[in-house]
Structures are given as structure tokens and as C-alpha cells.
Amino acid sequence: MIRAVDLGFGAVKGISEARQVEFPAAVGTFQPVRFTSGMEQQDVKDRLCVEFEGKRFFIGDIAFKQSSPRVTMNSDRFTSSEGLALMMSALLLLSNSQTDAGKLVAGLPVNEYAGLKNKYSDALTGKHYLQQIDPDGSGNDFFAFTIEEAKILPQPIGTLFDAVLDDAGELENKQLAGGRVAVLDIGKHTVDLALTDALQFVDRASVSFNDIGLFDAFKDLSLGIKNKGYDVPPDSLEPYIRGSRQLSGIAELKEQAFASQAEKITSRVINTWPDLWSFDRVFITGGGALVLGDYIASALDSEKVDVCQFPTFTNVKGYFKYGQRAWR
């Protein structure tokens, strides 16, 4: 069995042959919730509490409700207990049983890839145990997953593989595969740029930026709406951006915040790729593409720029297709 997990700084995405999952990449220190009514949300993903390597964590949505979640922006995150707990939680949600085994494809930011890929692969490979607990601290469901082999990719390359491979991992789009293809991956806290030429990774034209991302637009918007009497911190804005919650009279402020952040990212793209005119295709992907992609595509003013249709999942879909090809 093959699993693919894209562990971003904003969200965790996972795919298996039968399922796909997504949850916030939030980890909080676990403290038992003192009262439960029995009528709470019963979806495991929305109340995910685990014990891993002797430490207990709130994972995902519940971390925002019951703790002060941590977002670590350095490379240690991936191989730390918190990062591995996020990975194992994704595998738990993708599994059909309490004992499972298979192969895994995961990713790392472009700048972290060369220095961390072997360490990350070693940390992932082998047998792992996870205890799933209830928010009140009860429960002792154990999950064991054996990762037989792990392949690590630069994160944006997943989008390329999603575009050129079919679901069985066969090369489907040979013309695109033979061209110069760039991927702009906009995360919540990071932006990654990757360039390939005939599927060869062009290292000198690929880079990560850890000081820019969708969250900066959230911070600007949070400050702007405060003047209208709405005290919503940046971490809590996403439901209002996606439309599941409403705030009246903020459309213009959203436009300003998104356009401003898109302009900053576009500037980084042009500085990194001054020869962008020579590329055959540029894909805009990642969770940030949902709200910033069209702004950036318009600013780049090129028919060769595509905003991915389902940008949150294009990297992890590509990981899965790559795994299908690698282990067929």
C-alpha cells in the first residue's frame, strides 16, 4: 500500500488509494478537557488527540480550540516529535485498521531538501506507534504503522508529477514533461519556487522563502477589520476567507490585503525567474493559490501561467502518482 502526505506549515494533506484527508498543521500540548457533553463533533479529524513518543498532543482543529498551537518554521520541525506526530496522525486517518504497513512519499521545502532528506527518510522509515485518546484523556486505541520505505521529494515537484503522470504513474503528458516547467507553491507561511527542464530539477533557479506567504495577508486583513470593530486574530480568519462564516463590509479590505500580498510574491517570482518568458508552463499551487493565485497570474500576464484547479492537493496527488511509478 502506498501513502502520500504533504506536511505543510499551514495544513497537512494525505492521500491513499481509498481516502484523502486534510487538517491544520497545528500541534498543541494536551491537557484533558474537564467536561464533555457527549454531543460534540464525532468526526475523528475534528477531535484528534494523540500520544506519540511519550508526549500527548492536540492535533489539527482541536488544537486551536483547546490550546495555543505551535507553528515552528525551522527544519527541525519535520523530524521533531511534533512533526512526526502530525505525519502519524495523517497516516492514522488514511488507515483502515489499527495495524498497517506500506510505503510513503513525503516532501520537504526546496531550501531544506538537500540537507534534510536522508535524516527525514530515516526518521520516517520503520515501525511507529500512536495512541489515540479522547479529549478528556480517556481511551487507549493504539495504532501501529510500519513504513517499509520512504521517498522524499522537493514539495513543489509534486505539482509537476500531478500534471505529467496519470493515476497509475505512467507518463501521460510527454510534451509538458519535455519542457521548462516552473511551480510557484504558496503556503500559509512560506513560498517555494521550483524549476524543471525536461523533468530535471534546476537547482539554481529553485528556492524557498520563509518570510512571506498567505498568513501575511491575514495579518493585514486582521488589522484592517479591527478598525471596523471586528477583533479577529489572523489565526482565526480562515473561516471568514473561505466563506463558512461571514463578516459584513470587509470585501474591499480583503481585496486590498490579497492584492498587496500577491504583489510582494510576484516581485519575488520575477526576481528569481527573470527569464520566465522562456518557460513553457508555470503552475501556481498550494493553499495560498486559492485566494492569491488569480492576482499573481494576472500580474505575470502570461498565457503560460495556470492556477491549479485544486491547488491544496496537487502536490500530494503528485507524490502519490510518483509513488505508483516508483513502486509498480
Image: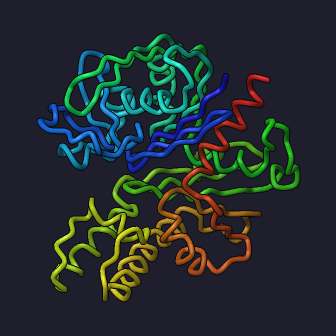
Q: Residue at x 28, y 38 (%)?
A: 27
Quadrant where the N terminus sits is top right
Q: On screen, 272 above or below 67? A: below
| Image x and y of residue 29, in percent | 19, 34
| Image x and y of residue 50, in percent | 31, 27
Q: How many marks?
A: 0
Q: On screen, 86 above or below 292? A: above
Left/right of residue 322 with respect to residue 95 in the rendered view: right
Left/right of residue 126 with respect to residue 254 in the rendered view: right
- Nearer to the camera, 73 or 138: 138
- Nearer to the camera, 152 or 21: 21
- Nearer to the camera, 69 or 261: 69
- Nearer to the camera, 33 or 258: 33
Left/right of residue 81 with respect to residue 94 in the rendered view: left
Structure colour scheme: rainbow
Furthest toward the left, the residue is 34
Left/right of residue 100 with respect to residue 179 in the rendered view: left
Q: Residue at x 65, y 61 (%)?
A: 283
Q: On screen, 292 above or below 180? A: below
Q: Residue at x 36, y 65 (%)?
A: 239
| Image x and y of residue 218, in percent | 32, 68
Furthest toward the front, the residue is 38
Q: Residue at x 33, y 47 (%)?
A: 61
| Image x and y of residue 8, in percent | 44, 45
Quadrant where the C terminus sits is top right
Which quadrant would residue 201 be assigned to in this image?
top right
Which quadrant would residue 193 be assigned to in this image?
bottom right
